[in-house]
Image (tube, rainbow, N blue to C red):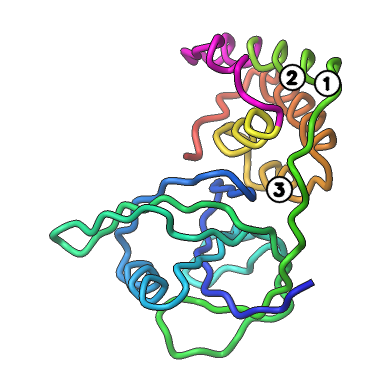
Amino acid sequence: MTVTRLSVFPLGGALLFPRMHLPLHIFEPRYRALVTDSLARDRRIGMVQPREGGAHPGLFDRGCVGRIAEVQALPDGRFDIVLEGLARFTIMRELDVTTPFRQVEAELEPVGDSEILGMGDRASLEMEARRFAEGQGYAVDWEAVSRLDDESLVNGIAQIAPFDIASKQALLEAETLQDRSRLIVQLMQFFGRSGDDVGTLQ
């Protein structure tokens, strides 16, 4: 594994996976500074979820580093960016820095080849996703969904599903695509049948 220094963006509910994309609207001054610094260096930003609220929350140990693949600088100093996921990471320690944004020393995980699901897991996921979407009143292009490869489908659902922060973190940390797919099914069954308004996190 590779140890590296990362500037991190703590954002609850925002997951990034290797080979996936995450659009972000950057408006807080400290994160505008992060983007400006990243563009001047290696274009990398570590996405990680906070464990709680507040100005300086504790962070979950694992996140995903992304490269700024697209950027639009707005006239008032805000940015619209798209991150392309590179690798998951584990935070080893937070660094004492003077920058307005937080930095960590992290260990990057090796990225393997795209994984595939068994036919039963794929069918189960698509079936439960239809039930969940109908129950939440979401309009979904199921023909387009059926054309997605397994990795794009599973990780795409994990990114946009309106689950709580702890559930999203469990999805990020799932070791295999099959594990993540089965966890998504369990979470959709739980949230879809609990009768609660799960809301939206993205």
Amino acid residing under circle 2: Leu
Q: Crowding at label 1, few (<14), some or many (≥20) Cα neighbours within 10 Å? A: some
Q: Crowding at label 3, few (<14), some or many (≥20) Cα neighbours within 10 Å? A: many
Residue at mark 2 to residue at mark 1: CA–CA distance:
6 Å
Q: From the viewer's perspective, is residue 154 above or below residue 75?
A: above
Residue found at the far front of this picture: 113
Q: Residue at x 53, y 60 (%)?
A: 53
Q: Crowding at label 2, few (<14), some or many (≥20) Cα neighbours within 10 Å? A: many
Q: Which residue is drawn at 66% across and 59% down?
A: 87
Q: From the viewer's perspective, is residue 86 above or below residue 4?
A: above
Q: Reading the chain from its start, which is encountered first: label 2 or label 3?
A: 2
Magenta stretch: helix, strand or loop mostly: helix
| Residue 200 counted in the magenta span | no
What residue is shown with label 1? Answer: 121
Could you say which disc has been placed on residue 172 in the image?
Answer: 3
Could you say which disc has been placed on residue 125 in the image?
Answer: 2
Amino acid residing under circle 1: Asp
Is 129 or 150 nearer to us in this picture?
Answer: 150
* Residues at circles 2 and 1 in contact by the CB criterion of under 8 Å: yes
Is 118 or 46 nearer to us in this picture?
Answer: 118
- Point out the image quarter for the N terminus: bottom right
Determine the image quadrant of residue 145.
top right
Q: Position of residue 8 (x, y in %)?
A: 53, 69
Residue found at the far left of this picture: 75
Q: Which residue is drawn at 63% across and 46% down?
A: 165
Q: Reading the chain from its start, which is encountered first: label 1 or label 3?
A: 1
* Residues at circles 1 and 3 in contact by the CB criterion of under 8 Å: no
Amino acid residing under circle 3: Leu
Tell me the magenta residue range: 131-150
